[in-house]
Image (cartoon, rainbow, N blue to C red):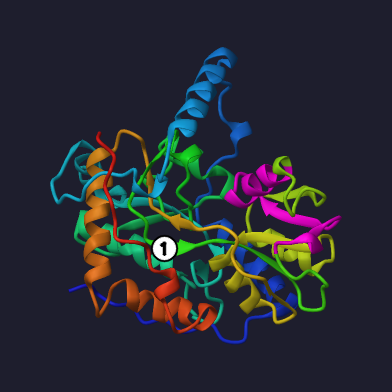
Amino acid sequence: MRVRRLRTGLKGWGGVGAMAVACALAVLFALLLPVVRSHGERGGADAGGHGVVQSRQARAAEECTDPEKQTLPPSGADGPTIEAIRNRAGAKRKLVVGVDQNSYRWGYRDPNSGGDARLEGFDIDLAHRIAEEILGDPDAVLFRAVPTNQREEAIDNGTVDLVVRTMTITCERLAKVAYSAPYFKTGQQVLAPKSSPITGYDDTLAGRKICTATSSTALSTLEQDRKDGGPAADADLSTTVPNQLDCLVRLQLGEVDAVVTDGALAASQAAQDPTVELKGAPFTTEYYGVAMKKDADDLVRRVNQVLVEWRADRTGGWQHSYDEWLKETMGADSRQSEPPAPQYLRGS
């Protein structure tokens, strides 16, 4: 039976003052939680080779359809990737997971919990569940804080074994990483001050400054919409940040007029600051998945097995984590967030 940990709920964390507390905590724990290096700190890559890789990735993305279905069937069998994790010695015998530490209710440090303010949230629950399956101990996990714009790089260079960080499954990303089946359904949505005349993803965005995270699906969606002459065609998209929470700070400081991000994350940000709200309905449909290396087939299959069991577990599984972490910010009805029945269409 999975060992459940006592958690103290986060109450009354809102507004600019709370954000200052959160930022201070982030600085403090940056000394304790390893953070992956920026792209500029890595060795230089051959320009020609990089161009070839980009061309292949672009072709793969064009040929991709239904990215949430491009994964392998679940299996409890071991393989080289899992064996390598299990063979780590001593204190290093842990699953290394890339997560966020600033996304309220997803992966964050509760300043009211006392002690070491350990990481908590929906994504953190899933990471513990995977560690329990592979290593027999839900706490045999080493969390590494990974900025939004470095998730794929962290997987590629082996800094982490997998990423559980509200990471949307897309065709472009499937050219670089492997994904599990979906574990959460969401969609892009607009976040703006309650007093703003912005009403949603519509013409009220014209001339407005919009903040997005670098390398996020929100940014790629808005850039494509601009090319297509949609609602974002006349918006200012120049403000991008490494982490999504930074957009909320920019909004609070009046540096931007709106934020576009996954509705699941936007709901958590609105819960942190009572002066902002979601504007309009989601305008895309997207799915979160666990990301791993392209050739880690045994790990992909094992994670998919974990997801099957997590969804079926009515006492400590998906629904329990939703009720504990997301019910307050997203509502009691979890059906809109439930992922579809998994399909495993990836051949190899």
* Pick the front one: 13 or 89: 13
Q: Where does label 1 land, which residue?
A: 184
**Residue pictured at 60% horizontal, 60% vertical:** 283
Asked if the stretch drawn in magenta spans residue 214, the answer is yes
Is 203 rendered above or below residue 35? below
Q: Amino acid at mark 1?
A: Phe
Magenta stretch bounds: 201-226
Q: Is residue 179 visible?
A: yes
Residue 214 visible in image:
no
- Quadrant occupied by the C terminus: top left
Q: Residue at x 79, y 69 (%)?
A: 198
How many numbered marks have been drawn onto this rendered protein structure? 1
Identify the image quadrant of residue 46: top right
Question: How far across and down, in percent of the image, does residue 244 sit?
Answer: 63, 58
Residue 160: image quadrant is top left
Residue 65 on image: x %, y %: 42, 41
Q: Residue furthest top?
A: 48
> Horizontally, is 240 left or right of 195 in the view?
left
Quadrant housing the N terminus: bottom left
